[in-house]
Image (cartoon, rainbow, N blue to C red):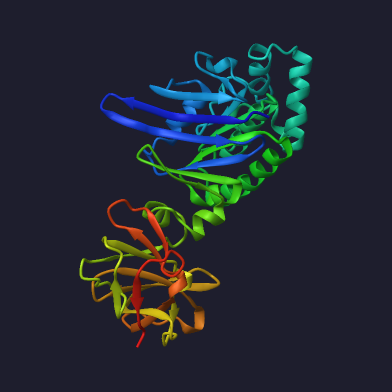
């Protein structure tokens, strides 16, 4: 399976810069998610990898071989599109075999054998005689995935393959696709705006925003040590609480003094804030409960601090305070991240990064 290497990929559409120097390596057999909001440039990046678009600058290589000038149909990759892209007048069998016969030059018997093999493994072989209008959305997406996997390409590109499906089907297909890709051993690049898809399916995640690569890492790395405030706010449900500190060192935390030499933002996850008296080595903040969200196992409580910051924390069901209650929550020093305000880049944890910040819960 190919190693995919992207080097300084840049792409503009008129005055709009879609990609601004993206460099990324996807290893042999690795599943990498490209995660970002709408308009971040992730689909443009996928199209450049597939050869459907050309970069203004930069290089795409498969196993060290430049793909410059190689058209899409000659690249060893299969694509699953967001909107299925099935031929409406063909049944599922022909939708799968047409590309195999005309694109790869396989004989009819071999193409049909591949189609029947992959659909049997996906448990959709009973759909082979149906046309797309006779299938549900989930069935059409399974056939689109079967068509891609039947190519037996070394590289599989997924372009938002689960968007538009209902929640239950979305979760089911997420598990199916992840299992099939692992079994196939293909190198996979999955473009998505859904953090749950990325966290559940990918070995590593590349987060991009406004054409910039924000961070590349494992799901755990992105959650526990987000490199920028964008990643901190984009990864996690609820997202990390981000609290600005003004030039005088004042924030929603009580008794805090900042000595970093630059304006900063403090970040803390909801699960690291606890309700009740603060420990000796902890920061505390106080606010009024504005919303209590049931999640099944616990409650996510949203409070509004006196400075106007909105802060979320997780709370066991019996201890969840009612709306309107004034409460105090605390966070241990080692759970608080510090970000440079100007760049949004992470400076480290309060204690581990050698940042001169003092606090007292007294």
Above or below, 108 relative to 286: above
Residue 215 in view: yes
Across and down, in percent, residue 247 comes to: 21, 66
Name the residue located 27 percent from the left edge and 72 percent from the top edge. Answer: 251
25 relative position to 54: left or right: right
**Point 43% across, 34% down: residue:** 22
Left or right side of 262 for 32:
right
What quarter of the picture does the C terminus occupy?
bottom left
- State the image coordinates of residue 80 (x, y, percent, origin top left): 57, 31
The N terminus lies in quadrant: top right
Which quadrant of the figure has residue 55?
top left
Direction from residue 20 to residue 67 in the image, left or right: right
Residue displayed at 61% across by 35% down: 188
In percent of the image, x 60 and y 26: which residue is there? Answer: 78
Q: Give the camera-side residue of 206 and 352.
A: 352
Image position of 59 with respect to 159: above or below = above
Left or right: 121 as drawn, with respect to 313:
right
Q: Is residue 163 something that shows in the picture?
A: no
Q: Is residue 307 above or below residue 108?
A: below
């Amino acid at each position: 399976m190919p190693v995919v290497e992207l080097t300084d990929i840049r792409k503009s559409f008129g005055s709009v810069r879609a990609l601004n120097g993206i460099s990324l390596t996807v290893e042999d057999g690795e599943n990498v998610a490209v995660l970002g909001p709408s308009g971040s440039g992730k689909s443009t990046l996928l199209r450049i990898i597939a050869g459907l678009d050309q970069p203004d600058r930069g290089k795409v290589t498969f196993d060290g071989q430049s793909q410059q000038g190689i058209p899409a149909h000659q690249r060893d990759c299969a694509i699953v599109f967001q909107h299925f892209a099935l031929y409406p007048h063909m049944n599922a069998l022909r939708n799968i075999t047409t590309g195999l016969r005309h694109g790869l030059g396989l004989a009819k018997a071999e193409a049909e054998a591949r189609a029947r093999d992959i659909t049997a493994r996906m448990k959709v072989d009973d759909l082979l005689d149906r046309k797309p209008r006779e299938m549900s959305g989930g069935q059409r997406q399974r056939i689109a995935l079967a068509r891609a996997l039947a190519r037996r390409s070394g590289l599989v590109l997924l372009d938002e393959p689960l968007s538009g499906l209902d929640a239950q089907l979305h979760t089911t297909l997420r598990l199916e696709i992840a299992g099939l890709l692992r079994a196939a051993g293909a190198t996979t690049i999955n473009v998505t705006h859904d953090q749950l898809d990325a966290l559940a399916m990918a070995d590593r995640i590349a987060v991009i925003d406004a054409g910039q690569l924000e961070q590349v890492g494992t799901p755990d790395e992105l959650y526990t040590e987000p490199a920028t405030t964008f990643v901190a706010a984009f990864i996690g449900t609820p997202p990390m609480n981000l609290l600005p500190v003004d030039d005088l060192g004042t924030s929603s935390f009580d008794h805090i003094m900042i000595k970093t030499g630059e304006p900063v933002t403090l970040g803390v996850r909801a699960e690291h804030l606890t309700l009740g008296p603060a420990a000796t080595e902890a920061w505390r903040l106080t606010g009024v409960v504005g919303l209590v969200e049931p999640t099944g196992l616990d409650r996510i409580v949203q409070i509004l601090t006196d400075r106007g910051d909105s802060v979320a924390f997780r709370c066991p069901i019996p201890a969840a305070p009612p709306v309107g209650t004034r409460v105090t929550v605390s966070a241990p020093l080692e759970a608080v991240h510090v970000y440079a305000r100007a760049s949004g880049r992470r400076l480290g944890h309060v204690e581990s990064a050698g940042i001169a910040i003092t606090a007292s819960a007294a």
